[in-house]
Image (cartoon, rainbow, N blue to C red):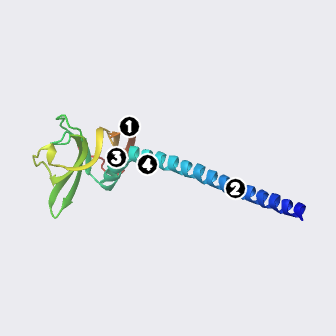
């Protein structure tokens, strides 16, 4: 009887030990999976934040890719440099020509919707995304966008205008 009791105790201890090993392994696998997931989410967020400015500007350009619909220049007017590189996107609404200006000023990418050639201050634009800079360059029908996000990561994009008459300057 004593021998039978010892055998049951050993079997019970073995089962409990096996269960404990299984539980520890399951927790270890979950912890590794959680760490991997966190790393993937962090990487994806960094890449998203890095690309969001150039993606936004490129989408706006593509949306305004019409005859004389996009031009790069200074804040006040396209074709004139005044120290603030600005993307001018033009559209006509009920007979009036409007200018959507996208530019970097005072730590933000800003957007300003106004009548064409209306003189306003750069601070009048709506703050969009925090950033460290935005550079725009136009060469014929190609617009190059270079943006630096608020964490100092730089991203570049190039947009080719496909409208028939090209870009108004």
Give the residue at mark 3: 53
Image coordinates for residue 111, horizontal then vertical, percent = 22, 50
Up/down of 9 relative to 102, above or below = below
First along the sequence among labels 4 and 3: 4
First along the sequence among labels 3 and 2: 2
First along the sequence among labels 4 and 1: 4
Using residue 40 as the reference point, say whether residue 150 is left or right of it.
left
Give the residue at mark 4: 45
Residue 160 appears in view: no
* Residue beneath the point at 18% across and 41% down: 75
* Residue beneath the point at 78% across and 57% down: 14
First along the sequence among labels 3 and 1: 3
> Depth check: 121 or 168 in front?
121
* Residue beneath the point at 43% across and 44% down: 46
Image coordinates for residue 59, horizontal then vertical, percent = 35, 52
Q: Are marks 4 and 2 in contact (CB under 8 Å)?
A: no
* Residue beneath the point at 72% across and 59% down: 19
How far apart marks 3 and 2 lie (CA) works out to 51 Å
Q: What's the mark number on residue 134?
A: none
Q: Tell me the mark number nearer the camera, choosing from 3 and 2.
A: 2
Count neighbours of disc 1 (C-alpha within 10 A) and say few if under 14, some if 14 to 19, many if 20 or more.
some
Say which element carries label 1. strand
| Total number of numbered discs in the rendering | 4
Give the residue at mark 1: 154
Q: Are marks 3 and 1 in contact (CB under 8 Å)?
A: no
Say which element carries label 2. helix
How far apart marks 3 and 1 lie (CA) works out to 10 Å
Image quarter hosting the N terminus = bottom right
Q: Tell me the mark number nearer the camera, choosing from 4 and 3.
A: 4
């Amino acid at each position: 009887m004593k021998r039978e009791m010892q055998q049951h105790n050993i079997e019970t201890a073995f089962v409990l030990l096996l269960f404990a090993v299984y539980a520890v392994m399951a927790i270890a696998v979950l912890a590794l999976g959680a760490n991997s997931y966190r790393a993937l989410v962090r990487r994806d967020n960094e890449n998203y934040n890095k690309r969001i400015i150039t993606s936004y500007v490129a989408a706006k350009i593509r949306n305004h890719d019409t005859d004389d619909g996009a031009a790069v220049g200074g804040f006040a007017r396209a074709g004139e440099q005044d120290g603030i590189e600005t993307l001018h996107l033009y559209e006509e609404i009920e007979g009036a020509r409007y200018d959507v200006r996208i530019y970097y000023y005072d730590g933000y990418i800003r957007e300003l919707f106004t009548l064409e050639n209306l003189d306003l201050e750069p601070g009048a634009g709506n703050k969009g995304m925090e950033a460290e800079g935005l550079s725009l360059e136009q060469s014929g029908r190609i617009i190059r966008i270079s943006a630096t996000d608020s964490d100092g990561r730089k991203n570049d994009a190039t947009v080719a205008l496909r409208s028939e008459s090209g870009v108004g300057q």
